Image (cartoon, rainbow, N blue to C red):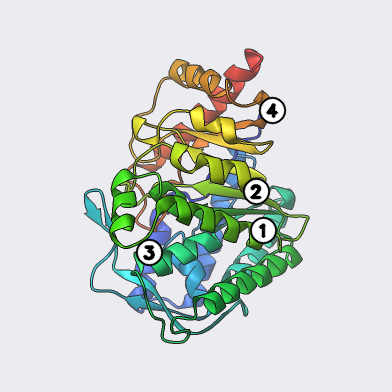
Amino acid sequence: MRKLDQVGSFLRPAKLKAARSDLANGKISQEELRVIEDECIKELLLECDKNNVYYLSDGEFRRSWWHLDFYWGFSGVIKIIKEKGYVFKGIETRAEGVKIVGKIECKNHPFIKDFARLVQIAKELNIDTNRLKLTIPSPAMFIYMLFIRGGFNVEFEYYGKDYARLKADILKAYEDFYNEFSKVGGVYLQLDDVSFGSFCDNDFRANLEKNGLNADECTKEYVEYLNKSLETMPKNITTAIHICRGNYRSHFSASGGYIKVAKELFAKLNIDKFFLEFDSDRAGGFEPLEYIKNQRVVIGLLTTKVKESPSLDELVSRAFEAKKYLKSSQIEFSTQCGFSSTEEGNEIDMATQWEKINLLNKLNETLENQGF
């Protein structure tokens, strides 16, 4: 039967949320929080194992954002509080961001320590460490954050407008991170990215045009930039990329099918595995999959945003639709996104989270019985 992968994040347990609140209020220390994080991660790994989730992450339990915590881990990058958050469809995020104040470097990145601890926890639980994966934002996502979300024609405190130097330093920081990740036992790294999902959105594309940018040219640039970064990846690491349309407290930020980016992204990105969203009409049809080469594709049929799910029969039918464009051996199934891209989590409960995981198990079992 197909090995069940999952985008990465899981809903934070109540005791973890309480502990983070206690830390913010000075009731516990960072070390005491870490003990509670370890307990919650152990419980998550065991629950995932029980529910046949093969590839295991720490649920992103040690971070508050799927992306910002990683950037804050680089030297030369600091956390800032902004005047307003990023506006999703119907909601505004927490007003936190990044500021470049020095040379961007990877020195003692906290995610390396966190993953090394995940390896230790897995060994304590007799779980094969080759099943572990880490999720981080992609280097292209960093460029998107700085030059599009952060403002157009932006000038940086340290780099000024020497964009070539800044981009080169980001690539080097990622290269160093990849090597450190491999040294602590990492064999599976997933890059998360909303830039390409944004380039599928007509309103977003129009806004780029108003600011002198072209979405197709940006797509080409970002794919080339990602490929430069992937060239520095140790050969023992399996690479994946999750192309998301935004996920904050069950809200999204972009719409549109992948066809607008498929010729560049699917045909030219040198990645091992794509995680793609196909959970609603907003995500478009499966036709863009024809541009996939020989990569595996994790098709996200189940939304993590709401309690409701399609019937098993509907999922089976859609799986066979996807098979028109890919070999069966290339296809896996998952939710379309994580359950908790930020610490707030999506507006569903724990029971729903595991119901969706078990529905995916039923889908895989049914498809196997039907010779998929």
Q: Which residue is mark 3?
A: 148
Residue 23 placement: quadrant? bottom left
Q: State the mark number for residue 329.
A: 4
Q: Nearer the viewer, residue 103 or 332?
A: 103
Quadrant including the N terminus = top right
Q: CA distance from mark 2 to mark 3?
A: 24 Å
Q: Given contact means CB atoms under 8 Å apart, are the residues at marks 4 and 2 in contact?
A: no
Describe the element under mark 4 as helix, strand or loop: helix
Q: Residue at x 45, y 50 (%)?
A: 216
The answer to whether one can see residue 27 in this image is yes
- Counting residues from the start of the chain, the first of labels 1 and 3 encountered is 3
Q: Which residue is mark 2?
A: 271
Q: State the mark number for residue 259.
A: none
* Number of the front mark, 3 or 4: 3
Residue 237 in percent (x, y) is at 73, 54
Q: Is residue 352 left or right of residue 70?
A: left
- Counting residues from the start of the chain, the first of labels 1 and 4 encountered is 1
Q: Given contact means CB atoms under 8 Å apart, are the residues at marks 3 and 4 in contact?
A: no
Q: Dot 2: within a 10 Å radius of its alpha carbon, few (fewer than 14), some, or many (20 or more) residues?
A: many
* Number of the front mark, 1 or 4: 1
Describe the element under mark 3 as helix, strand or loop: helix
* Number of the front mark, 4 or 2: 2
Residue 169 in percent (x, y) is at 59, 76
The residue under label 4 is which amino acid type?
Ser
